[in-house]
Image: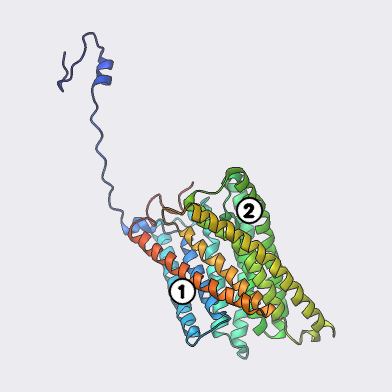
Amino acid sequence: MFDNHDHYIPPGTSHSDIEMLTPQKPEEEKPIGLVSIRERLRHFTWAWYTLTMSGGGLAVLIINQPNTFRGLREIGVAVYILNLVIFALVCSTMALRFILHGNLLESLRHDREGLFFPTFWLSVATIVCGLSRYFGDASNEAFQLALEIIFWIYCVCTLLVAIVQYSFVFSAHKYGLQTMMPSWILPAFPVMLSGTIASVIGGQQPIRAAVPIIGAGVTFQGLGFSISFMMYAHYIGRLMESGLPHSDHRPGMFICVGPPAFTALALVGMSKGLPQDFELLYDTSALEDGRILELLAIATGVFLWALSFWFFCLAVIAVIRSPPKAFHLNWWAMVFPNTGFTLATITLGNALHSEGVKGVGSAMSICIVCMFLFVFVNNVRAVIRKEIMYPGKDEDVSE
């Protein structure tokens, strides 16, 4: 007996057996339809601010170089202005996404994308630091007053982010400790950079504003670092129990380099930013106390720098052993936290008057510039090749 396709069927074979014996025609693959720009904008996530926080950090790094050359400041100004343009484009595109799709609250509540909302505030922090370093003038009272107001607004907003976002995460999501990633630290990162801003603007402020700004900087820097340090316990436990993350997520391991590095940078910077005549507000021994605070800050900074170095080495080895196969915006973690690490190295080199440490900082800066260009090129290629800003490929997909 033969079927309709001329295949031999043994006598007595049932109808169900005939269906099993008959070769099935493979289903034709459905062509992937073109995704419109409108639909791609739905997947333009908060993680895009990792680009602008890295660009702003690079601009601050350039102006803080210990070994300079003619035209370096102009290069830094160009990078700073270019980053402002990119920041404006990212903000406009994010606004367009929410206007077209109305998913602002959904993005903030998302278990993965929502954790990248603080990168917006990190971008703001680098912009404020760059504004002070490139255009700051201690004699311009109006400008310094504007920076003071911006600082306090930033402190209030980022403190609310740290409180509200963690409160929401604790009540609305359940994360397994075996899946812990350094992105859990991000809600505490912006308030921690209050200390970094204070270290940059504090020295230019009048005595009336400098001491409160530096005091708030120490307070919020301590808060952010303390939260990060508690998260480190879960992170190390995850690595011990479950091993290294998937190769595509390993660039995110560099996030752990940031908190101790920025804390070292902030503590040394704030100790040096104390006004020389602040004894008028307190007592005659304040100058001597200020020198003691500076020495303590340097010692603590070296201590924290070593912790950053350890996390940096772990991340480098992990990425080299298994490089990521596809571009994700977490690649920018290879730039921004390491920018803080490099700034901390330069700051400690200046504080210790060590030409060798300054030279290491300059070499690290060259590496940061190369890494920024490498990630930026891959970011643009990923958009063109539809590796990001595409359904199922961005941070708006739960893992």
Q: CA distance from mark 2 to mark 1?
A: 32 Å
Q: Of 145 and 325, which appears nearest the observer? A: 325
Residue 380, picture quadrant: bottom left
Residue at the (52%, 58%) spot, across then down: 116
Q: What residue is drawn where x is 62% and y is 49%?
A: 170
Tag 1 secondary structure = helix
Q: Nearer the viewer, mark 2 or mark 1?
A: 1
Above/below status of 304 relative to 197: above
Label 2's element?
helix
Inspect this view and state whether residue 275 appears.
yes
Going from the N terminus, do you reach mark 2 or mark 1 first?
1
Crowd around label 2: few <14 · some 14–19 · many ≥20 (10 Å): few
Residues 137 and 100: in front is 137
Which amino acid, by three-letter code, is at mark 2?
Ser
Looking at the image, is 167 positioned above or below residue 23? below
What amino acid does circle 1 point to?
Asn
Q: Say whether residue 230 is left or right of residue 312.
A: right
In the displayed structure image, the side of residue 308 where residue 33 appears, left or right: left
Residue 230: horizontal and vertical position, in percent? 68, 55
User: Which residue: 66% across, 64% down?
Assistant: 306
Q: Which residue is mark 1?
A: 83
Residue at 69% across, 60% down: 226
> From where the camera sits, is residue 108 visible?
no
